[in-house]
């Protein structure tokens, strides 16, 4: 599996001094409609270490840092691309190649 970082995300990660991406599954438990989605966040080294040791996330090393994959089953394409979407003052990590 190959991880690709888009240039906007790389500059944002460098600006924030973060180099790890955590892939998680978020689910709503307090709604009439059950919604489950993939959630990405930038993680400091301390949080990344905790996810690896306590929650058994799999760590994949890249040129930039680590990608932490959850222990439960997700489907991954051969190439996974991470990007950054900007809206006004908000930033959101985007991805292609990860499926529920």
Image (tube, grey):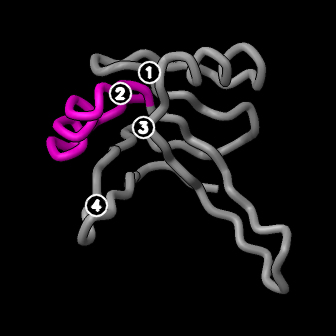
Q: Earlier in the sequence, mark 1 or mark 2?
A: 2
Nearer the observer: mark 2 or 4; the answer is 2
Q: Which residue is mark 4?
A: 85
**Residue 96 x, y percent position in the rendering:** 39, 53
Mark 2 neighbour class, 10 Å CA radius: few under 14, some 14 to 19, many 20 or more: some
Q: Residue at x 58, y 55 (%)?
A: 38
Q: Residue furthest bottom?
A: 32
Q: In the drawing, does residue 85 fall left or right of residue 75?
A: left
Q: Nearer the viewer, residue 74 or 55?
A: 55
The CA distance from mark 2 to mark 3 is: 25 Å
Give the residues in magenta: 1-20
Q: Are marks 1 and 2 in contact (CB under 8 Å)?
A: no
The residue beneath circle 2 is 18
* SS class, disc 2: loop
Earlier in the chain: of badge 2 and badge 4, it is: 2
Alpha carbon distance from label 1 to label 3: 17 Å
Front position among marks 1 and 2: 2
Q: Which residue is mark 3?
A: 78
Query: Which is nearer the N-term, disc 1 or disc 3?
Result: 1
- Side of 90 relative to 48 (left or right): left
Mark 2 to mark 4 CA distance (whole Å):
17 Å
Query: Seen in the image, is 28 located left or right of residue 1?
Result: right
Name the residue: 28% across, 33% down.
Answer: 16
Measuring from the top left, give residue 70's x and y in whole percent.
67, 34
Residue at 35% from the left image edge and 27% from the top image edge: 18
Q: Is residue 65 above or below residue 40?
A: above
Q: Quadrant of residue 62?
A: top left
Residue denoted by label 1: 66
């Amino acid at each position: 599996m190959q991880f690709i970082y888009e240039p906007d995300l790389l500059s944002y990660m460098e600006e924030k001094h973060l180099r790890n991406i955590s892939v998680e599954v978020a689910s709503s438990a307090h709604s009439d409609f059950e919604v489950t989605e993939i959630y990405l966040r930038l993680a400091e080294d301390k949080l990344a270490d905790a996810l690896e040791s306590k929650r058994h996330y799999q760590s994949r090393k890249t040129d930039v840092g680590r990608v932490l994959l959850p222990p439960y089953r997700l489907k991954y394409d051969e190439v996974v691309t991470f990007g950054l979407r900007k809206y006004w003052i908000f930033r959101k990590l985007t991805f292609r190649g990860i499926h529920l």
